[in-house]
């Protein structure tokens, strides 16, 4: 139907006859001549219709925005003064000889020949129209380039692409499962995979040695900002490797993608123990572009009367930390109030501060509502420890360690952004030496990664002091985002049973839920490990998009629904009956 893409017609084709198809981007009537800009995925081309080609002229006159057309015409140089250097096709135009309307279009829900902010709901409802915009086309094409670069890298390194089931059993990654009722097994349910974790490990037991998959994963989470209920991972597993080998290899893959697609050299990835990341940055995914660190100041505050500081300073489960912000003394009261509200989201009950105006004058040169509670001496010792300079502001967090880390960690990132403190464009690192477990409020344990992660100690040591055990897990972090994470796995049955036991999973439940894994570990499971990268987030970072929804063709909204298809939707009673499901009566509205 066509000889060229619209966007590929250029001065090399002058005087040639071309046929192309696409959408009418814009129609202009210039006193007797009709101009059409016609668009396809490669770009726009300008077509001119003269009144002397009567039929074509009349048809061109009748088309409207987004009509689908097929045009044949002759390429010619644009008259002097009308060329457009910024357009691929800006040196030429096509003199239209024939135009064939392949389909009409209703008035678009939003104009495509100029940007108007119509709101995300409208864009998602008419996503197929939204994706006609060059911004969306570029992002999705870029995504395709990245997946193909990743595939090429992995295949060149001997990885095999193997699919794993979507209808399966629960794979614990810390979220709720999406369940699918079984028609043929009354009362039983499949779970959609939260990740291909157990299958990829079983592929190692089978001897495939190196596996990858661009895998859909499903997690029914309360949708915090920028998560999707279904998302894509580049999922990787290999046998007979240690953490250095696997980390080195996949780091090579990410560096390769950045070098090829953005001409960026990410440099070497430093490694940072989890404990250091939490202490200095309040986060296990520190943004190292921001030159600020959290500093412990408990030692100066344990013996003061001011309980707000003294109590947490003495409590081993708490932390009192300071964050020095260069140039922050200029923040107004109103701005400080806003930051106080901001840390409130993370549970902080307040945000104490000291402004450093003239440090050479001692406490006289400081400004703060809290010095009188801390005491002059302690205040100056803190200033000394922080090496405070004129123009700084120091913020304090005093609470449960988790609250202080989350609040000051988030504040650090927010200030970094608000005050534009970034020292470089990209900062990648590995976070390592994670604890195996976290203690819940009721004293039970949760695996920090997942329960198949190998600890760096023996089963006996693990059982004796589970909270002290470190794991052989590693996370790749870029600009404060977790790009990927994984671990060396447990390949020994006794170790796997120990981890389950520490997690409070009874023997019966172990057999019921993970019997197939425990069995497989009996039959010669090789040492193995792997990791998974969040593809959506990777593309978001690479394209500078503001949300992962911008790099997914058909994303769900924050309430885990699709406004276009109206999924999830109701089903008929017959379907429910087939699935042996009876819905509970909906709560009756209050009288
Ligand atoms: N299955 C893990 C996840 O989805 C990644 C891994 O450990 O390989 O986070």
Image (spheres, rainbow, N blue to C red):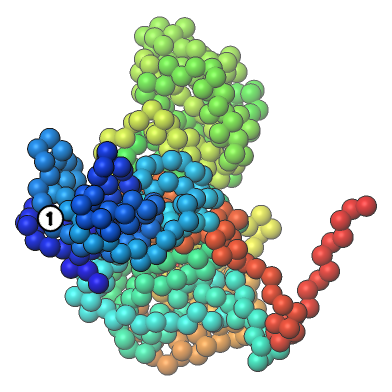
Asked whether 343 or 319 is in front, the reply is 343
Q: Is residue 139 visible?
A: no
Q: Is residue 340 above or below residue 182?
A: above
Residue 509 lies in quadrant: bottom right
Q: Residues within 10 Å of mark 1 (few under 14, many from 20)?
A: many
Answer with left or right where residue 466 lies relative to residue 22: right
User: Is residue 281 visible in the rendered structure shown here?
Assistant: yes
Report whether the residue tagged 1 is closer than 8 Å to ligand 1.
Answer: no
Tell me the residue that label 1 is attached to. 75
Q: Residue at x 31, y 43 (%)?
A: 28
Residue 372 position, x and y percent, is: 58, 14
Q: Quadrant for ligand 1?
A: bottom left
Task: Relative to 322, say whether 230 is above or below.
Answer: below
Q: Nearer the viewer, residue 549 or 414?
A: 549
Find residue 101 and report its horizontal and vertical position in percent: 34, 63
Q: Position of residue 378 (x, y in %)?
A: 50, 20
Return the residue nearer the eye: 553 or 334. 553
Residue depicted at 66% across the width and 54% down the height: 441
Q: Position of residue 213 (x, y in %)?
A: 36, 75
Q: Is residue 591 left or right of residue 217?
A: right
Number of marks: 1
Which residue lies at the image location 65% right of the left edge and 81% below the top edge?
181
Residue located at (43% from left, 54% from top): 130
- Is residue 365 positioned above or below 468 on the image? above
Quadrant housing the N terminus = bottom left
Q: Residue furthest right?
A: 591
Q: Is residue 464 left or right of residue 29?
A: right
Q: Secondary structure under badge 1?
A: strand
């Amino acid at each position: 139907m066509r000889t060229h893409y619209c966007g590929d017609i250029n001065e090399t084709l002058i005087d040639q006859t071309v046929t192309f198809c696409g959408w009418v981007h814009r129609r202009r009537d210039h006193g007797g001549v009709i101009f059409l800009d016609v668009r396809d995925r490669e770009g726009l081309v300008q077509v001119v219709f003269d009144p002397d080609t009567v039929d074509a002229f009349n048809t061109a006159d009748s088309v409207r925005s987004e009509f689908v057309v097929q045009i044949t015409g002759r390429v010619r140089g644009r008259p002097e003064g009308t060329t457009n250097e910024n357009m691929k096709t800006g040196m030429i135009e096509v003199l239209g000889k024939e135009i064939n309307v392949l389909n009409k279009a209703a008035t678009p829900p939003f104009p495509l020949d100029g940007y108007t902010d119509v709101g995300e709901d409208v864009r998602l409802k008419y996503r197929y129209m939204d994706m006609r915009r060059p911004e969306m086309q570029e992002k999705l094409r870029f995504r395709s380039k990245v997946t193909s670069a990743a595939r090429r890298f992995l295949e060149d390194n001997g990885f095999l692409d193997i699919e794993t089931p979507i209808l399966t059993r629960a794979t614990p990654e810390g979220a709720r499962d999406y369940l699918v009722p079984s028609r043929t097994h009354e009362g039983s349910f499949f779970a959609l995979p939260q990740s291909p974790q157990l299958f990829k490990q079983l592929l190692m037991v089978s001897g495939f040695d190196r596996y990858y998959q661009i895998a859909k994963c499903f997690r029914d989470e309360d949708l915090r900002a920028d998560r999707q209920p279904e998302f894509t991972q580049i999922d990787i597993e290999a046998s007979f490797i240690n953490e250095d080998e696997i980390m080195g290899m996949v780091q090579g893959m990410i560096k390769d993608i950045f070098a090829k697609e953005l001409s960026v050299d990410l440099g070497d990835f430093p490694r940072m123990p989890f404990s250091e990341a939490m202490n200095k940055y309040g986060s296990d995914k520190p943004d190292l572009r921001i030159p600020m660190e959290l500093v412990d100041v408990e030692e100066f505050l344990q013996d003061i009367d001011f309980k707000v500081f003294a109590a947490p300073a003495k409590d081993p489960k708490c932390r009192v930390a300071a964050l020095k912000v260069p140039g922050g003394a200029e923040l107004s009261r109103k701005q400080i109030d806003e930051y106080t509200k901001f840390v409130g989201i993370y549970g902080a009950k307040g945000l104490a501060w000291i402004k450093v105006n003239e440090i050479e004058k001692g406490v006289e040169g400081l400004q703060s509502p809290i010095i009188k509670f801390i005491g002059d001496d302690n205040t100056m010792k803190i200033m000394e420890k922080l090496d405070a300079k004129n123009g700084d502001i120091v913020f304090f967090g005093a609470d449960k360690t988790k609250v202080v880390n989350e609040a000051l960690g988030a504040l650090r990132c927010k200030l970094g952004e608000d005050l534009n403190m970034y020292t470089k464009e990209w900062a990648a690192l590995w976070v390592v030496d994670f604890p195996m477990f976290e203690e819940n409020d009721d004293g039970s344990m949760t695996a920090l990664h997942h329960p198949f992660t190998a600890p760096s100690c023996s089963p006996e040591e693990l059982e004796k002091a589970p909270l002290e055990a470190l794991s052989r897990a590693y996370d790749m972090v870029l600009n404060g985002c977790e790009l990927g994470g994984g671990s060396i796995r447990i390949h020994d049955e006794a170790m796997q049973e120990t981890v389950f036991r520490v997690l409070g999973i009874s023997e019966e439940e172990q057999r019921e839920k993970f019997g197939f894994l425990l069995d497989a570990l009996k039959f010669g499971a090789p040492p193995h490990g792997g990791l998974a990268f969040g593809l959506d987030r990777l593309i978001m970072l690479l394209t500078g998009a503001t949300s992962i929804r911008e790099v997914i063709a058909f994303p769900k909204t924050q309430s885990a629904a699709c406004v276009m298809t109206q999924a999830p939707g109701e089903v008929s009673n017959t379907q429910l009956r087939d699935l042996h499901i009876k819905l509970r009566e909906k709560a009756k509205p209050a009288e």
